[in-house]
């Protein structure tokens, strides 16, 4: 969800105004995904690199995160949304950690949409923690590394129980994935838009979905194999979207 600061600067507002407006875009996008029967939406809210930002901005972002959890969890629960937070949340203060855990517990039984917030998350961190968990689960792998397979790590990356992402959306004009879900995005369709995140609307989401629907997803197969029906149908229904 890129472009909050630039959105604010363009309007001669403080950067934090862009972050607050970005929360409105989150709410409208969640509602849009629910209406479109998308089963999973993952939002990159705060990366492990974002700690490098000015201390005042980081502090305000943490306050905004707490305020959103306190205000929106009941609404998400009423909408049937399951909330998850992935990332190294131990870096947050105790109050925020408790809010995160309580919010996930409250919505754990919901099935209409799984909304995942990546906070203090990085793809490098994700893979490293998966390696640590795999070795803790099967210590002999440290002695026999040749036995390590993709399956050992796949069980332990975050979102291991979610479908692989179908569509990755990045707003704000940059065309890179910036350390987001490096393991999970291997076969994901990428979509980049110049629209700043605070201006991202359901109509913009539909543009991204329309672009996705024009893609041919081969997963290593040929076009002829796809036409013969050897892969899943190329449409975004009950799918997994990343922003």
Image (cartoon, rainbow, N blue to C red):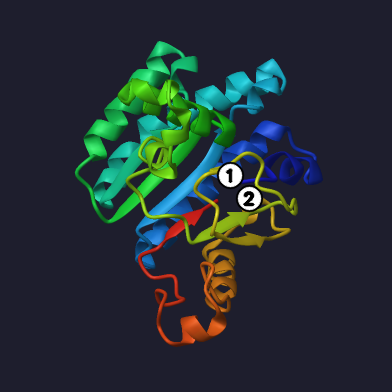
The image shows residue 39 at horizontal and vertical percentages of 35, 58
Give the image quarter of residue 20.
top right
Position of residue 202 measured from the top left corner of the image (x, y, whole percent): 52, 64
Q: CA distance from mark 2 to mark 1?
A: 6 Å
Residue 77 drawn at (x, y percent): 26, 44
Residue count near mark 2 (Cα–Cα under 10 Å), binned few <14, some 14–19, many ≥20 = many
- Judge the density around disc 1: few (<14), some (14-19), many (≥20) Cα neighbours within 10 Å: many
Residue highlighted by disc 1: 22
Query: Is mark 2 in CB contact (under 8 Å) with mark 1?
Result: yes
Lower position in the chain sequence, tag 2 or tag 1? 1
Residue at image location 38% in from the left, 20% down from the top: 97
Q: Residue at x 45, y 13 (%)?
A: 93
Q: Is residue 35 above or below residue 111?
A: below
At 31% from the left and 25% from the top, the residue drawn is: 137
**Residue farthest to the left, as pictured:** 109
Q: Is residue 197 left or right of residue 30?
A: right
* In-front residue for pair 12/34: 34
In this view of the protein, can residue 92 be seen by the observer? no
Determine which quarter of the picture holds residue 102: top left
Can residue 46 be seen in this snapshot? yes
Q: Which residue is mark 2?
A: 197
In this view, the residue in front, 105 or 165, is 165
Tell me: 154 left or right of 177. left
Where 243 sits versus 48, above or below? below
Q: Which mark is residue 194?
A: none
Q: Which of the 4 quarters of the picture holds residue 117?
A: top left
Tag 1, which secondary structure?
Answer: helix
Q: Under tag 2, what secondary structure?
A: helix
């Amino acid at each position: 969800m890129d472009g909050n600061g630039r959105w604010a600067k363009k309007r001669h507002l403080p950067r934090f105004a862009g972050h607050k407006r970005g929360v409105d875009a989150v709410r409208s996008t969640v509602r849009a995904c629910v209406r479109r029967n998308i089963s999973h939406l993952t939002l990159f809210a705060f990366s492990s690199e974002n700690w490098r930002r000015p201390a005042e901005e980081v502090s305000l972002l943490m306050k905004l995160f707490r305020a959103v959890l306190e205000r929106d969890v009941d609404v998400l629960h009423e909408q049937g949304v399951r909330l998850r937070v992935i990332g190294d949340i131990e870096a947050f203060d105790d109050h925020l950690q408790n809010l995160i855990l309580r919010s996930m517990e409250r919505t754990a039984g919901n099935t209409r949409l799984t909304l995942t917030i990546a906070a203090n998350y990085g793809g490098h961190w994700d893979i490293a923690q998966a390696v640590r968990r795999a070795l803790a689960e099967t210590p002999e792998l440290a002695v026999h590394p040749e036995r390590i397979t993709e399956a050992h790590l796949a069980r332990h990356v975050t979102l291991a129980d979610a479908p692989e992402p179908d569509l990755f959306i990045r707003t704000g004009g940059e065309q890179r994935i910036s350390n987001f879900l490096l393991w999970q995005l291997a076969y994901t369709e990428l979509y980049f838009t110049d629209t700043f995140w605070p201006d991202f609307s359901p109509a913009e989401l539909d543009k991204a979905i329309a672009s996705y629907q024009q893609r041919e997803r081969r997963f290593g197969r040929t076009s002829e194999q796809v036409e013969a029906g050897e892969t899943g149908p190329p449409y975004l229904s009950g799918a997994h979207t990343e922003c």
